[in-house]
Image (spheres, coloured by chain):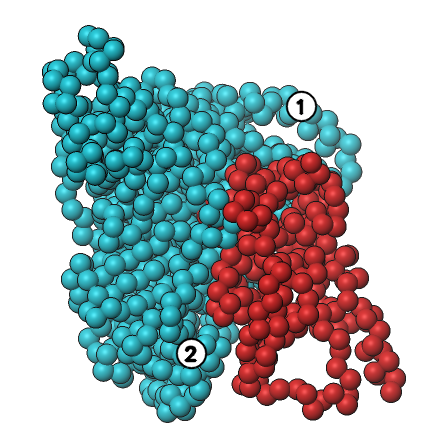
Chain colours: A red, B cyan
Amino acid sequence: MEKNDHDDKQGNGYSRRGFMQFIGVGAGVVGASLLSPPLRRPLKAEDVGTIFPASEMVKVRLAVNGTVHAVLVEPRWSLLYVLREIIGMTGTKIGCDRGECGACTVLIDDVPRYSCMTLAVEAENRTITTVEGLMKGEELGPVQTAFVETDAFQCGYCTSGQIMAVEGLLRKVESPSPEEIRLGCSGNLCRCGAYPNIFAAAGKAAQLKSK
Amino acid sequence: MATRDKIYYTEGLPVPETPDLGTQPAFWKKTDLVGKPIPRVDAYERVSGTAVYPSDILLPNMIYAAILRCPHPHARVKKIDIAEAGKMPGVRAVITGDSKEAKGVKWKYRDMEVPLFDSHCRFEGEVVAAVAADSWYQARDAAQAIKVDYEVLPFVVDYERSLDVSVPRVQEKGNLLSEDTYSRGDVEKGFAEADIVLEQTYHTQCELHTPLELHGCVANWDGDRLTVWESSQGVFAVQSRVAEALNLPLSKVRASGHYMGGGFGSKLWPGKYTVISAMLARKAARPVKMLLSREETYLCAGNRPAGTMRIKAGVRKDGTITAIDFDCIGPSGAYPAGGVQLVDWLARDLYLCANVRTRGRDVLINAGPARPFRAPGHPQGAWALEQMIDELAKAIDMDPVQLRLKNVPLKSQAREGTPPYTSTGLRQCLEKGAEKFDWQASLERIRKFNEQNNHLRRGIGMGACLWVAGGGGPPSTVVIKLFRDGSINLNMGASDIGTGTKTIMAQVAAEELGVQPAIIQIENADTATTQYATPSGGSKTVPTEAPTVRNAAIALKQELLAAAAEDMEVPEDELEYIGDEIIWSRDAAKRLRITEVSRLKKRGVMIGTGYRGPNPADKVVNPFAAHFCELEVNILSGEINIIRFLGVHDSGRVMNRMTFDNQVYGGIVMGIGFGLTESRQLDERQTGRLCNKNWHDYKLPTAMDVPLEITSLPIELDDPESNNTGAKGLGEPVTIPTAAAIANALCMATGVRFTRAPVSPMEVVRKLSERKEG
Ligand code: FES
Ligand code: FES
């Protein structure tokens, strides 16, 4: 049972999930996310009977912004699809659905992740935060406010992902250096090229948060 | 030549006439709100996640669509078998070229009309079949389960070989789509008069728009009325193309897209997918959401065509450019799409030159058709021309900024009758830019740096441009509604594609009406509730819509003054509109609040309608710019690190300093991609297929690739002749000379001319080792 022992060691050795985490977040938080445990505990050989056929719906409980949603999903559905099309929270955007752009970034247990590369079933029993979850009632949170004040977007489609990347960074590092900010945003593409203002927003958000 | 400016206005679109306003309001000498760095009026919606983009639309009973596309660059569909797909779980509609609803439905590529489902597939990614099913996943599964029997045909995807006799024909008439020539003066004589004549061939690669929001739409039928929410730069273009394809009256097609996640030209009009979504929605009797996959957008949502440009130019020692001969070839793709459109424009018009000859050949290849891409033709043309100008300067031992300054035109030489520009800020862009960039001192500093002779070399470079359009123009109609409580609704057809259009229009209306922008609610980009506007693109949106908004505000004020004159029983021309009050000029004590005007109180609303007046006759409105760049090259690894960038822009009046600077940064970032990393890779020899249809393999600039120091310097010239706001376009010039400036800096750093964009580290190493051996 050597294999199982190995599997049980979290964050050890190469795993597909580990790889997904690596490409799934800005490089600045890569260190943090690689150290964070994989989303779902690895299955043991004897658990095999619980694997569902792809077309069969399973019930998952997703804790999104403090509210638990019980939803029926196909095991292959991404968290992104379930958030947007099933639960109806469309603040999280879809740019590629293949882990390249970061438009779909959400926080899972405070760590930025690509929700298109996360299965909904993987996200069960985790704390999921989306851009809607940064609001304080009707008021914008500090990162959102900083984005407005520094004009850190143009079309605005990458923006919720950028905001979540910055939020995740600031939850890890209180006042990041310019280089840390760049790294923290590097997993999020902005085709409009608003990067200079996004960096400024991150700096400003750090100030607003510390107030 | 006039039609050259019209690409964003009328191409394929019926355009209504706009009446002349008759009078022009006075030019603003001083403004209170216009120009101020006011945060965007829709910023809250965009950062809170509440803005509903077309891809966010959710309707009850909505289902999802997917398209099956031809995997070959050239093939004929022989047989399609949908039996299995039709029985798959969740599937509600399947449409192919054999379906009865597809019969007779046409699609247009410019003037060429083809069946919407064409069994002759001329590019990888051509539509073959479409499916709608309950979930996104089911739709994709079912599309994959459709069995297609293809007759695979020989192909050509290398545009430089497309005119060879032995290559397959993309269209029956052959692969030369058009040949366009231009000439003024006598080029041969010009070369004879030159002290130096240089000739060089430059290449640029095919660039893909890839806006963050996928191309797509939601289509819904309500009886015989169709509503389409489309991620679009122009909802009226969506309306007219869909109505035409489905043979519906315009009134029965509502196109809407209040927000949109980027387009850069690729969303100026809808795609086949839009019509197909409507057909699927009708067949399934459900609303249908269709989002193309990212891979599909690489195949069929347009591109900036690759180009080969040969340029020969002569110069005298005093800096007079005596002749330019420019020849270019580029591919439209498989259908007419402007393969070399405007590539030669800068060679024709940017610098003083009496003798110019150009030729452009637009060819066909078996690849996805082009679409206009931010400043069509110009970044390519600048890549060739602006490097050549630097070479000429070096050859006559003149500073490249000086050589450009010697040749600043005040007239458009390439247009009929050489009309003057309303303003030419090129001189100021060059002078102020060189000063701000510390050009002279930097040259010295860098020479010293490079003498240390380690593996790092530095260079500075610059490039300049104009943009052929950017003056805006009719048609446009805007309505401003004043409600009983004094709040205002600004109703405008144009989309805000991320440039801040809505914010700027709120500033213009607020300036004219003397109110705070916050009380103005903007209603835009919806064919059912707003008036006709041309698609937002070509740097024409602000210079088109801002004067129209101003006219609407003035019309509303006139309405109010007339109504107040009745209430106050004084002559209308003795009344003044100040802030939210109407005051009698003879006795300021006699005043009336706007909300007290009885006509407004009784009717509940008063409106002002504005139209876009004509542009000045016999004058040309063009923006100008210069970009300056400093970079560092690792001559061992070929790595290029851009250290600082300066964008200097004459776009007339700065309407909002914050969104202005943001455009400049964004254009520079995109230009860095064009110059250094972005390139569509077609497998020319073996399969003809696109090898890098994703963002991992097709690399956009990321947060790690942009210079930390990036500066915007506006040259604000009064231009009262351009239009009544004095604003010229900005969105295109910001990305035109960027790549050329990088190339010129690279040349200074390495001593080697890089003629092929993008310049990869491998290319740097290859060229440098070539030089060592040579
Ligand atoms: S949509 Fe998830 S990374 Fe692009
Ligand atoms: S704001 Fe448009 S992609 Fe970032």
Question: Type of residue at label 1?
Answer: Glu
Q: Residues within 10 Å of mark 2 (few under 14, many from 20)?
A: some
Q: Position of residue B715 (x, y in %)?
A: 44, 24
Q: Is residue A168 visible?
A: yes
Residue drawn at x 19%, y 33% as measured from the top left:
B600
Q: Position of residue B494 (x, y in %)?
A: 31, 45
Image-quadrant location for residue B484: top left
Q: Which residue is identified by label 2?
A: B134
Residue drawn at x 65%, y 69% as measured from the top left:
A123
- Observer-nearest residue: A93 or B59? B59
Image-quadrant location for residue B511: top left
Q: Position of residue B62 (x, y in %)?
A: 38, 72
Residue drawn at x 34%, y 60% as measured from the top left:
B229
| Picture layout, residue A53 above or below residue B54 | below
The quadrant in which the N terminus of chain B is found is top left
Question: Type of residue at label 2?
Answer: Asp
What kind of element bears circle 1? Answer: helix
| Picture layout, residue B228 above or below residue B629 | below
Image mark for residue B444: 1
Q: Give the CA separation, mark 2 to mark 1.
A: 67 Å
- The CB of the residue at mark 2 lies under 8 Å from ligand 1: no
Image mark for residue B502: none
Look at discs 2 and 1 and give the one toward the viewer: 2
